[in-house]
Image (cartoon, grey):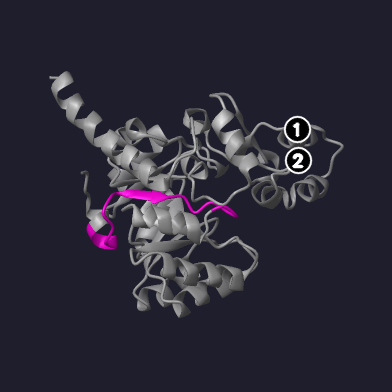
Amino acid sequence: MIKSRICEILGIEYPLFQGGMAWIADASLASAVSNAGGLGLISSINAGTEAVRAEIRKCKELTDKPFGVNIMLQAPNAGEIARMVVEEGVKILTTGAGSPAPYMEMWKEAGISVIPVIASVALALKVQALGATAVVAEGAESGGHVGELHTMALVPQVADAVDIPVIAAGGICDGRGAAAAFILGADAVQVGTRFIAADECTVHQNYKDRIVKASDISTIVTGKTLGHPVRSLKTPFSNTFAKMEADPSVKPEEILSFGTGALRRAVKEGDPDGSYMAGECAGMVKRTEPARDIVADIIGGAERILSEAGSRLV
């Protein structure tokens, strides 16, 4: 099986991260991915600091393998979460939506590996200088909050610019995407959307059904006018959101109010008027299955493709 330096650094079997998807990535999913040999991640956007603490403790009961927590640094309780993960002995963090600088000294003193999600070479260099263990280079194909650059262009440029390991994210759903990422210079891949359809993912069944039924043109990016672009499935909610953005008579605060709580409603209630965040690879997810099978398919598929490519391209 494929190995890389990130496996040794983090103590994981395979160079595969599960995305720390807001409201979605909990102890059930994270432990299943970690038990399968990847790195499971728990989202810090989950009903408050103590709820996240509870998920961390639950994950420790469900696995003895490494797992981590994803911290959204613009969240109102980011400071509380930053201190709580130290208290709980978490050893791996991914961060997004802001700079980890205010917390790096505390985290490094606690022996935590900090892996920021970045969307440009400049940001990658900044967090490397801060002492980041690795970076997740996330392209605009991903679900949720997205940047401008796409995975195929972003990953090799970041890999060329930094000395620390690079984890590729955005549009990776199977062994083909993983193999491409490794060839581009990535040390590992991060997969989000496909894990929504994992048996151990606790989202509402409506969410899973929408992912499985998605096609190649099923996603849309909204929120650009607000400065926070988000990729999600096309639904009556996302279509209305896009129309509100395009209407100059609608104030930004009205749009923000309309979107508040929409992801939680989709995840927890399967609300058809919710926001179903998903990446462009949603159309490649054909069924629900155990997380272990997803990990094995992606890593095994990448290994097979890389081996076959060597003989096919000679």
The residue lying at 52 percent from left, 55 percent from top is: 25
Pointer 2 residue? 273
Q: Quadrant of the C terminus?
A: top left
Q: Nearer the viewer, residue 72 or 40?
A: 40
Q: Nearer the viewer, residue 102 or 31?
A: 31
Residue 104, quarter of picture: bottom left
Q: Which residues are magenta?
A: 8-24
Is-magenta flag for residue 22? yes
**In this picture, is 98 found above or below 16?**
below
Are the residues at dot 1 and dot 2 in contact (C-beta closer than 8 Å)?
yes
Q: Amino acid at mark 1?
A: Pro
Mark 1: few, some, or many residues within 10 Å (few <14, many ≥20)?
Answer: few
**In this picture, is 149 found above or below 166?**
above
The residue lying at 63 percent from left, 47 percent from top is: 204
Q: Position of residue 145 (x, y in %)?
A: 57, 46
Residue 303, quarter of picture: top left
Q: Position of residue 170 (x, y in %)?
A: 45, 39
Q: Position of residue 198 (x, y in %)?
A: 48, 44
Q: Nearer the viewer, residue 107 or 291?
A: 291
Is residue 54 left or right of 109 when viewed as pictured? right
Is residue 212 left or right of 270 when viewed as pictured? left
Give me the C-alpha separation between circle 1 and circle 2.
7 Å
Pointer 1 residue? 236
Count of numbered labels shown in the rendering: 2
Is residue 32 left or right of 301 when viewed as pictured? right
Q: Amino acid at mark 2?
A: Asp
The residue lying at 41 percent from left, 76 percent from top is: 89
Q: Main secondary structure of the magenta part?
A: loop
Residue 230 appears in view: no
Label 1 SS: helix
The disc, 1 or 2, on the residue closer to the chain's N-terminal end is 1
